[in-house]
Amino acid sequence: MPELLVRIRQRLKSDPLPRNLGTMDVVSDAISAVRIGQPSSNRLQVEGSWSTRLAPYGGAGFHVVLAGGCWLVPDGGGAAVTLGAGDVVLLPHGTGHVLADAPGDTARAVPFEEMRRPAGGGVGSEVGGGRGVELLCGKYRLDRSRVHPLMAELPEVVHLPNRVGAHPELRAAVDLLARELDERRPGSCLALPSLLDLLLIYMVRAWMSDAATGVEAGGATGVWPAVLSDPVTTVALRALHSDPAAPWTNDRLAAEAGVSRATLARRFTALVGRPPMAYLTWWRLTRTAALLRDTDVPLASVARETGYSTPYALSHAFSREFGVTPGRYRAGVRGG
């Protein structure tokens, strides 16, 4: 199992924008375009009366309830959410919130950092001697400069209850995480980050599935589940994401989708919010930014991979969109 997870993680790192995954190409690309670094997590055990505040974060936060139950109260007056054993909650925009044994006065909440203490130098932390509530709390680092609209429309709180028969992939990931949380198991230091990466994918998939079927998952149903349920738009998006460097035109893309140019333009623009070629330009430059951030690929190779005839053409388009040259962008995101 550790070897498989290592290979998955290496693939995610070396090819930040996976290919050939059908409709999920767009989902994988949307996540990979913003996900940076490794996720971090802490194990928390509490009992009795307790309340802790997690400050707003520039990435995304998540919680997995391994045992017991608690309440989550988001900042800004959002509705309190009750969490039970096996529940998963994603805060995709890093919303500050309180976790507590009851949804009462949040003023008594202590900072999350004060509740934690090292648990033998491993991945997790714990507090208290009992096992009333056990949580896996973590966060993902995200680059907010180029968020795909699919990720941008996620609600502040995505609550995925532990319903029988719902989201088997997510449930399997939660079960594996629970088993790997003992840092004494061989390979846990590699297995846990890989499982957390998979957890993010499964959480977004689960939200899309619930939204598409009208199941409440923390907010409005969203546009992108509808986008990826439309066969014409899905085929067009899959083509653009699978091969952004191809010499796409409206006519060629319409032929790929099996409809007229006018039909494609009308349906794609209505659902996605911009015409096909405008979306392609946006996606090419978004992919360029990810390649500059995550790899050492020369600019000439980046240009070929993203559909620009020369490095100069790419640099001109990139500078117009980002206000900085590709070289300066790469140096800036890497702290150079």
Image: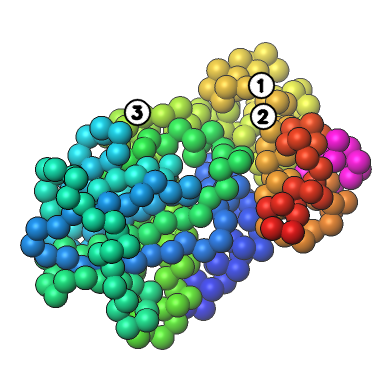
Q: Nearer the viewer, mark 1 or mark 3?
A: 3
The numbered mark at residue 279 is: 2
The magenta segment is 304-316
| Residue appearing at x 48%, y 67% in the figure | 194
**Of callouts 3 and 2, which one flags the residue occurring earlier in the amino acid sequence?**
3
Judged left or right of residue 23, residue 306 is right
Amino acid type, callout 1: Pro
- In this orientation, which residue lies closer to the viewer: 165 or 296? 296
Q: Secondary structure at mark 2?
A: helix
Number of other residues with Cα within 10 Å of mark 2, as a class: few under 14, some 14 to 19, many 20 or more? some
Instruction: Report the quarter where the C terminus lies.
Output: bottom right
Q: Is residue 283 above or below residue 62?
A: above
Does residue 277 appear anywhere in the picture? yes
Toward the viewer: 259 or 39?
39
Q: Is residue 177 above or below residue 286?
A: below
Q: Do labels 2 and 1 touch, CB within 8 Å?
A: yes
Label 2 near label 3: C-beta < 8 Å? Answer: no
- Residue under circle 3? 220
